[in-house]
Amino acid sequence: MLTHERLREQLSYDPETGEFRWAVRKQKVKLGSIAGKVKKAGYVEIRIDLVSYQAHRLAWLYMTGKWPQGDIDHINRNPGDNRFENLREASRSQNLCNVGALATSSTGVRGVDLHKASGKYRARIRVSGMRIELGLFATLDEARAAYAAARNTHHGRYAEGAAGELGGI
């Protein structure tokens, strides 16, 4: 397991930009060059001592001196934004609260779908693994508002958009 000391020997980290740079000369790597590769989902991955690590987890270790106990949530939902102010420790459940609508969403709004039988918009939310029906609404905006209110009540600071208006909510 990578230690705080070994990480600081290998890399420097700028908490204001979220960038890691190599602090040592390596084969095919210039001293001071930006470390890591952006992977398919947008997360930055850095290889140290033949082991790959996610940059947001390394940022947490670099700044706090310890590995995160659970997930690291990107507050603004941008997986490539590893500024320390954009990172927070979260449980898996809390981290999943801070996601947008699924790509398969018919409305493009998280927690809202079209209820075909009534022709109205249905809002619902998951809390501790249980689905709560929020009701049927005549307009998408009414359903969106009901979901947003429930989200803020049940998910608090981990609610999608808690750091500002994100993703159409």
Image: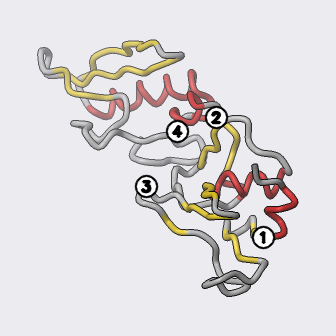
Crowd class of label 2 (few under 14; some 14 to 19; many from 20; radius 10 Å): some
Percent across and percent down for residue 85 are: 71, 55
- Could you tell me the amino acid type at mark 2? Arg
Q: Secondary structure at mark 2?
A: helix
What residue would you read off at disc 1?
Answer: 10
What residue would you read off at disc 3?
Answer: 41
Whether pointer 2 and pointer 3 mark residues with C-beta atoms closer than 8 Å, the reply is no
Q: CA distance from mark 2 to mark 3?
A: 24 Å
Q: Nearer the viewer, mark 2 or mark 4?
A: 4
Q: CA distance from mark 2 to mark 4?
A: 9 Å
What is the quadrant of the C terminus in the image?
Answer: top left
Q: CA distance from mark 3 to mark 1?
A: 25 Å
**Left or right of 109 in this view: 130:** right
**Left or right of 163 in this view: 119:** left
Q: Secondary structure at mark 4?
A: loop
Residue 157 image label: 2
Whether pointer 2 and pointer 4 mark residues with C-beta atoms closer than 8 Å, the reply is no
**Left or right of 109 in this view: 160:** right
Q: CA distance from mark 1 to mark 4?
A: 32 Å
Where, by quadrant of the figure, is residue 7 drawn? bottom right
Instruction: Say if 6 sits above or below 139 in the image.
Output: below
- Could you tell me the amino acid type at mark 4? Asn
- Could you tell me the amino acid type at mark 3? Ala
Mark 1 and mark 4 lie on one chain; the one further toward the N terminus is 1
User: Observer-nearest residue: 131 or 72?
Assistant: 72
Q: CA distance from mark 1 to mark 2?
A: 34 Å
What residue would you read off at disc 4?
Answer: 98
Mark 1 and mark 2 lie on one chain; the one further toward the N terminus is 1
User: Observer-nearest residue: 115 or 3?
Assistant: 3
Mark 2 and mark 3 lie on one chain; the one further toward the N terminus is 3
